[in-house]
Image (cartoon, rainbow, N blue to C red):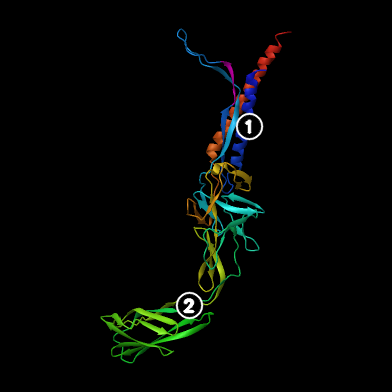
């Protein structure tokens, strides 16, 4: 049979593969974090018709004569170029800006994905759209343990921010230097004990001939002196376990702006809301005004991401040629950063895909012509004897 006939068949098969890959790219043009693929061809074995000859004194050498036997698909490569950002406003949606993959677990299998369309299920576990568990680290008392094993990320709906006793308070503002001797200013501040029980601490400022005297309702006192409006003495006051810092006070005329600007105690609080930060941290906001890291999303990188195997659902699994995953946090050791409230769009370029579609179609047609031409030659041979 004619070699051209089988070359044409191999061309049809190879260009059919190109059509299949291109069609799949176009079908996934709106798939979140989809990475397009491309087909690379290579020739098959060539039949040696005549060997090469060595140059002699009286004759020159000759090159080998070979006839190719067709084409085959060398590889189908995945393009991991960054896709565009699509803002969604959903707080649990994450986009990787740069290299890296999210780590997800389904049953006993661990997979990797660029699709960050996450949500929480009825048990507070962070999952993908098809129910795979997002992997990361759970915080202990607001801290992530470096190097710890990853696990399912769970939103602790009943989490409580512990109470803290007040140990320091800060007073700022101005005490009027022209106030009458004996005049008083009273400022109250809410303080807390170890169990978060609130109490009121009253500070009474009394004008004296030499400055001001501050006293607490518990009997602690301190004398404040000023020179040219600057505090020169009595900058701290101890009231039981609480140290009151007054070093920011001033003593200029006319202004009466003294206030208790803050204290470090708080009551216990319950979880009110949460948000995901750029390093993948799940940060909870509590009713007592505290914020605390609850968990952190893990990322993975591979030496050869093109060696990953697609498993469907926008997920990948490692192969012997991808290398083993390196697990880490966003923004560390080559891991990409995270964008909250956004998703990565498909990186398929429609103009390029439609061009590839035309090329594949014409290549298929040209190889079909080889087959029809070979058939006509064979028909001519069979008609030699009639």
Find residue 309 and report its horizontal and vertical position in percent.
60, 43
Q: At 71% across and 11% down in the image, what residue appears?
A: 383
Q: SS class of the residue under badge 1?
A: helix
Find residue 5 and report its horizontal and vertical position in percent.
65, 21
- The answer to which quarter of the image holds residue 140 is bottom right
> Which residue is under mark 2?
265
Residue most toward the left? 228
The secondary structure that dominates the magenta segment is strand
Give the number of marks. 2
> Which residue is under mark 1?
16
Alpha-carbon span between mark 1 and mark 2: 71 Å
Task: Decide if residue 199 is on the left or right side of residue 180.
Answer: right
Residue most toward the right? 386
Locate the N terminus by quadrant.
Answer: top right
Above or below, 205 relative to 35: below
Whether pointer 1 and pointer 2 mark residues with C-beta atoms closer than 8 Å, the reply is no
Residue 221 magenta = no
Query: What is the magenta range?
Result: 44-50
Task: Decide if residue 79 is on the left or right side of residue 202.
Answer: right
Residue 251 is at least partly visible in this image: no
Q: Nearer the viewer, residue 267 or 185?
A: 267
Find residue 3 and report its horizontal and vertical position in percent.
63, 19
Task: Decide if residue 248 is on the left or right side of residue 101.
Answer: left
Residue 46 magenta = yes
Find residue 70 and report its horizontal and vertical position in percent.
60, 24
Residue 353 is at least partly visible in this image: yes
Kindly identify which numbered label has been placed on residue 222.
Answer: none
Q: SS class of the residue under badge 2?
A: loop
- How dense is the environment of label 1, judged by Cα within 10 Å: few (below 14), some, or many (20 and up)? some
- The answer to which quarter of the image holds residue 27 is top right
Choose the circle earlier in sequence order: 1 or 2. 1
């Amino acid at each position: 049979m004619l070699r051209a006939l089988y070359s044409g068949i191999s061309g049809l098969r190879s260009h059919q593969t190109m059509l299949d890959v291109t069609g799949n790219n176009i079908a996934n043009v709106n798939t979140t974090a989809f990475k397009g693929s491309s087909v690379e061809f290579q020739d098959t074995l060539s039949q040696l018709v005549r060997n090469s000859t060595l140059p002699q004194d009286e004759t020159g050498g000759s090159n080998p004569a070979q006839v190719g036997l067709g084409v085959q698909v060398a590889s189908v490569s995945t393009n991991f170029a960054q896709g565009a950002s699509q803002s969604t406003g959903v707080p649990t949606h994450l986009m990787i800006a740069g290299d890296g993959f999210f780590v997800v677990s389904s049953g006993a299998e661990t997979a990797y994905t660029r699709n960050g369309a996450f949500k929480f299920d009825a048990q507070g576990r962070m999952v993908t759209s098809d129910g795979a568990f997002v992997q990361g680290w759970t915080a202990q008392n607001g801290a992530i343990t470096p190097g710890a094993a990853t696990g399912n990320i769970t939103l602790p709906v009943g989490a409580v921010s512990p109470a803290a006793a007040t140990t320091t308070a800060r007073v700022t503002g101005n005490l009027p230097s022209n106030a009458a001797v004996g005049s008083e200013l009273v400022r109250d501040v809410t303080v807390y004990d170890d169990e978060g029980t609130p109490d009121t601490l009253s500070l009474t400022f009394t004008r004296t001939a030499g400055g001001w005297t501050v006293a607490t309702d518990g009997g602690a006192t301190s004398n404040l002196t000023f020179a040219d409006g600057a505090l020169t003495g009595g900058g701290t006051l101890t009231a039981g376990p609480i140290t009151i810092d007054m070093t920011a006070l001033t003593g200029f005329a006319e202004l009466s702006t003294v206030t208790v600007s803050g204290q470090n105690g708080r009551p216990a609080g319950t979880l009110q809301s949460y948000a995901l930060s750029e390093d993948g941290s799940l940060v909870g906001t509590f009713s007592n005004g505290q914020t605390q890291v609850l968990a952190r999303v893990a990322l993975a990188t591979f030496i050869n991401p093109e060696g990953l195997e697609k498993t469907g659902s926008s997920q990948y699994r490692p192969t012997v040629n991808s290398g083993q995953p390196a697990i880490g946090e966003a923004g560390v050791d080559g891991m990409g950063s995270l964008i909250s409230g956004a998703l990565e769009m498909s990186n398929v370029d429609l103009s390029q895909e439609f061009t590839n579609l035309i090329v594949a179609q014409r290549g298929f047609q040209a190889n079909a012509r080889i087959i029809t031409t070979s058939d006509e030659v064979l028909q001519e041979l069979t008609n030699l004897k009639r």
